[in-house]
Image (cartoon, rainbow, N blue to C red):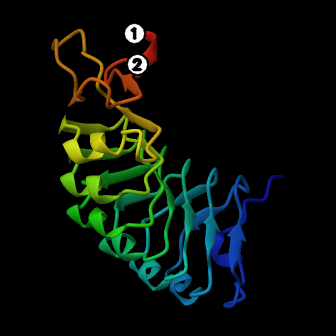
């Protein structure tokens, strides 16, 4: 018989700096007690069977740099507290049921280098404030329900003087509508995906 441990069965040392439990078939929701882990720098929970939402108490984790919960059944919106994490440089929420929009508060995450939110239920326009994040290296926004245009400030981060080397959106023209879900200027997105077929093409392959 396969035992599936509950996340709540863990006993956390409150002075821990790292928690890595990926691919362990964990079930249940992320408990609000994570807010007590104020020394935690890495929080890896990817590839489990977690559900529920991201607790607002995550805002107390002021040293958190690396937050990975991809490939889970986590739902709900991204709490505002996430946008207040002062040290975070990596946020991986892809392959989840996260919904809502990306808040304009994302402009506060000035240390962020990697944002991966593909294959979620996120929707709406990509906020212009994302262009303020000058440390960005990788951004995945594809296979979701974003619309509108890639902000000019985000495209500017693709210049030789900046660091953004990977920007993926649903910018392929769809056959049924003759339009792309997201409009991306030439030379901006590194990869364009079709929101209907989920097929992605590297832009260098068609340029």
Q: Is residue 119 above or below residue 19?
A: above
Q: Nearer the viewer, residue 8 or 151?
A: 151
- Kindly tell me whether residue 202 is visible in this rendering: no
69 with respect to 121 (left or right):
right
Residue at screen point 20% across, 11% down: 176
Q: Label 2: how many residues lie within 10 Å, few (<14), some (14-19) or many (20+)?
A: some
Q: Is residue 47 above or below residue 17?
A: above
Q: CA distance from mark 1 to mark 2?
A: 5 Å
Q: Nearer the viewer, residue 99 or 58?
A: 58
Number of marks = 2
Quadrant position of residue 202: top left
In what element is the residue under mark 1?
Answer: loop
Q: Nearer the viewer, residue 12 or 188?
A: 188
Residue at screen point 29% across, 25% down: 171
Numbered tag placed on residue 203 in the rendering? 2
Residue 92, given in percent of the width and then of the height, sits at: 51, 53
Residue 112, given in percent of the width and then of the height, sits at: 44, 61
Task: Report if the CB atoms under discs 1 and 2 are less than 8 Å apart.
Answer: yes
Q: Is residue 179 above or below residue 17?
A: above
183 with respect to 13 (left or right):
left
Numbered tag placed on residue 78 in the rendering? none
In what element is the residue under mark 2?
Answer: helix
Numbered tag placed on residue 206 in the rendering? 1
Pick out the residue farthest to the front: 161
Q: Is residue 203 above or below residue 2?
A: above
- Kindly tell me whether residue 139 is visible in this rendering: yes
Residue 152, given in percent of the width and then of the height, sits at: 20, 42
Q: Label 1: how many residues lie within 10 Å, few (<14), some (14-19) or many (20+)?
A: few
């Amino acid at each position: 018989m396969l035992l599936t441990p509950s996340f709540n069965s863990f006993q956390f040392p409150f002075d821990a700096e790292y928690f890595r439990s990926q691919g362990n078939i964990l079930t249940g929701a992320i408990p609000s007690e994570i807010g007590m882990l104020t020394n935690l720098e890495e929080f890896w929970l990817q590839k489990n069977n977690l559900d529920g939402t991201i607790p607002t108490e995550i805002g107390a984790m002021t040293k958190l740099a690396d937050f990975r919960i991809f490939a889970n059944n986590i739902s709900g919106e991204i709490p505002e507290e996430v946008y207040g994490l002062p040290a975070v440089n990596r946020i991986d929420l892809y392959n989840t049921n996260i919904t809502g929009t990306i808040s304009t508060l994302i402009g506060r995450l000035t240390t962020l280098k990697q944002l991966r939110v593909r294959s979620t239920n996120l929707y709406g326009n990509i906020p212009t404030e994302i262009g303020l994040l000058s440390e960005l290296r990788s951004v995945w926004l594809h296979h979701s329900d974003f619309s509108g245009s890639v902000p000019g400030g985000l495209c500017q981060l693709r210049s030789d003087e900046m660091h953004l080397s990977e920007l993926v959106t649903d910018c392929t023209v769809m056959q049924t509508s003759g339009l792309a879900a997201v409009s991306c200027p030439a030379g901006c997105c590194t990869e364009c995906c079709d929101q209907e077929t989920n097929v992605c093409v590297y832009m260098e392959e068609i340029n």
